[in-house]
């Protein structure tokens, strides 16, 4: 059964609310039963937008639970209501590109198969599986690999745009470890694309530019690796006021350490409505012997002692010994509706200029909190820096369509603001305006998994010199430009 939830009625959609006509139309879709649920039905609450700042409204939602339903739903969109589709796995697109106006929205979150081939260290996983579910299943066999850091994100979108976690310093991005992708094309053909078959060009394009530009990805075959039973994982609280000095020390340490393919660093600058205090937390992760990890951590800590009194979270050797799943589960799992905006840029280093800009951005946050028109319990500003070094930026740029390799992409700077009250929109936009004025100083490459709907040169920022080749592949597999949205790959002129 295909469950179709309609949100509105206009001149082009009146027939959709006529049960008799829908019944007749269903005969054109392999005799499927279409269940029409009006917007007052309690089930509709599941489809609330995660981010009301982007008020996109599809004509309806269809929740997909198997491949047959997906094919029928694409046929329904193309041939019956004559609309494009938008594709949602977990709904985490920071610009709401997964839910688009005037489309049939295909909710892929019901596709939950995750099958591990332990002997060959390969997993076949469908696009609706969250990363927490994925890590739980693979870690049962002490297997794992690159992926996302947010546990509630699904594999469907993130896999096509990158996928970086602490294991990426050794194994590359998630998309570097995809062996095969099953994708439904506009012509209704279901194909398997890999590096050695007739769809090798499509396989190249999907890994980095696959966000609904060529078809609908259903599942992925992914290479897994043996993981350690325990990893060294610790954190240091640094003085926010000394962030410029501490960032220079961290940057120099990562450039000179012989363990750069073993050490992962994350930096989290944050202020919440509850704390009203700017914090600066360094996350340290080590791949390898626990004692070696402790030694490397202490080296970095001693260097940071030159700044103002850093505090180590844990000195107990048992508490810093964590399974990979325990580390993943430390990140809060949240799918709550909230108003948010996100910006991200790749950068070469943690230099003084970048740190000064970062400090200025974060120092505006408490001022905005104090100017709020109405109280907002979740008001939260954060700037997060992730390390993208190691193997993930050493692979050739032409390995797939993902261009963000080399020294210019050693770090990513991500800025996120969360709140709930519409009355505070104008106040919080002040922070976004400040960020936008500084973004180009951090770098001009944009991580596809953090799209920027305000970027005018997105073709270059996402895809660089690969863009003309992507246009030719688009023409080959989607010649009618059916899979189209604000920043989808364009057909060549």
Image (cartoon, helix red, strand yellow):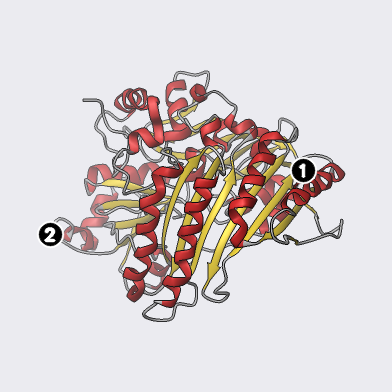
Q: Residue 315 location, x and y as percent?
A: 84, 59
- Mark positioned earlier in the residue sequence (1 or 2): 2
- Secondary structure under badge 1? loop
Residue 168 visible in the displayed image? yes
Secondary structure under the numbered disc 2 in the rendered image: loop
Q: Position of residue 99 (x, y in %)?
A: 35, 54
In the figure, 394 relative to 22: above or below? above
Real-space Cα separation, disc 1 to disc 2, in angstroms: 56 Å
Left or right side of 482 for 342: right
Instruction: Name the residue carrying label 2.
Output: 11
| Residues tagged 1 and 2 counted as in contact (Cβ below 8 A) | no
Front of the two marks 1 and 2 = 1
427 vs 158, nearest the viewer: 427
x, y (%) of residue 489?
32, 34
When the figure is inspected, residue 50 is found, relative to residue 222, above or below; the finding is below
> Which residue lies most toward the bottom here?
374
Q: Nearer the viewer, residue 270 or 465?
A: 270
Q: In the depicted view, which residue is nearer to us: 67 or 454?
A: 454
Query: Could you classify mark 1 by the number of other residues whose Cα lies within 10 Å: few (under 14), some (14-19), or many (20 or more)?
Result: some
Q: Is 127 drawn above or below residue 12 in the view shown?
A: above
The residue indicated by pointer 1 is 142
Give the label on residue 246, or none.
Answer: none
Which residue is located at x 35 percent, y 64 percent?
430
Is residue 307 or residue 489 the one in the foreground?
A: 307
In the rendered image, which quarter contains the N terminus? bottom left
Q: Residue at x 53, y 53 (%)?
A: 153
- Of the 4 image quadrants, the one containing the C terminus is top left
Question: Are there few (<14), some (14-19), or many (20+) residues within 10 Å of tag 2?
Answer: few
Q: Residue 406, how many percent across, how many down?
A: 54, 29
Judged left or right of residue 164, residue 68 is left
């Amino acid at each position: 059964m295909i469950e179709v939830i309609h949100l509105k009625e206009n001149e082009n959609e009146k027939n959709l609310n006529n049960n008799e006509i829908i019944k007749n139309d269903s005969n054109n879709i392999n005799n499927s039963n279409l269940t029409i649920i009006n917007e007052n039905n309690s089930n509709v609450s599941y489809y609330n937008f995660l981010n009301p700042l982007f008020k996109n409204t599809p004509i309806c939602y269809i929740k997909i639970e198997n491949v047959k339903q997906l094919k029928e739903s694409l046929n329904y969109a193309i041939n019956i209501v004559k609309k494009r589709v938008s594709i949602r796995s977990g709904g985490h697109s920071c610009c709401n590109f997964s839910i688009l106006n005037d489309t049939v929205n295909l909710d892929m979150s019901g596709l939950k198969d995750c099958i591990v081939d332990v002997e060959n260290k390969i997993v076949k996983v469908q696009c609706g599986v969250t990363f927490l579910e994925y890590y739980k299943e693979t870690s049962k066999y002490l297997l794992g690999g690159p992926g996302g850091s947010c546990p509630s994100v699904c594999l469907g979108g993130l896999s096509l745009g990158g996928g970086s976690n602490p294991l990426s310093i050794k194994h590359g991005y998630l998309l570097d470890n995809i062996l095969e992708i099953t994708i439904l094309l506009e012509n209704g053909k279901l194909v398997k694309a890999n590096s050695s078959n007739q769809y090798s060009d499509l396989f190249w394009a999907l890994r980095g530019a696959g966000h609904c530009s060529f078809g609908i990805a259903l599942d992925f075959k992914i290479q897994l690796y043996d993981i350690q039973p325990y990893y060294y994982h610790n954190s240091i609280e640094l003085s926010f006021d000394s962030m410029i000095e501490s960032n220079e020390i961290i940057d120099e340490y990562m450039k000179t350490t012989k363990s750069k393919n073993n050490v992962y660093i994350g930096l989290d600058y944050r202020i919440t409505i509850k704390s009203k205090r700017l914090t600066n937390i360094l996350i340290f992760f080590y791949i390898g012997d626990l004692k070696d990890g402790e030694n490397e951590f202490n080296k970095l800590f001693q260097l940071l002692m030159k700044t103002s009194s850093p505090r180590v979270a844990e000195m107990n050797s048992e508490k810093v010994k964590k399974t990979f799943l325990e580390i993943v589960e430390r990140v809060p799992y949240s799918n709550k509706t909230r108003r948010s905006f996100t910006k991200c840029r790749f950068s070469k280093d943690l230099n003084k200029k970048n740190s000064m800009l970062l400090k200025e951005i974060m120092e505006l946050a408490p001022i905005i909190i104090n100017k709020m028109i109405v109280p907002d319990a979740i008001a939260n500003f954060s700037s997060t820096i992730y390390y993208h070094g190691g193997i993930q930026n050493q692979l050739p740029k032409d390995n797939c369509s993902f261009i963000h390799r080399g020294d210019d992409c050693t770090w990513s700077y991500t800025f996120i603001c969360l709140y709930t009250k519409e009355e505070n929109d104008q106040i919080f936009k002040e922070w976004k305006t400040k960020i936008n004025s500084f973004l180009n100083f951090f770098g001009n490459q944009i991580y596809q998994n953090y799209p920027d709907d305000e970027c005018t040169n997105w073709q270059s920022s996402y895809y660089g010199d690969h863009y003309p080749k992507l246009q030719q592949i688009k023409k080959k597999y989607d010649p009618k430009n059916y899979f189209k949205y604000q920043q989808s790959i364009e057909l060549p002129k």
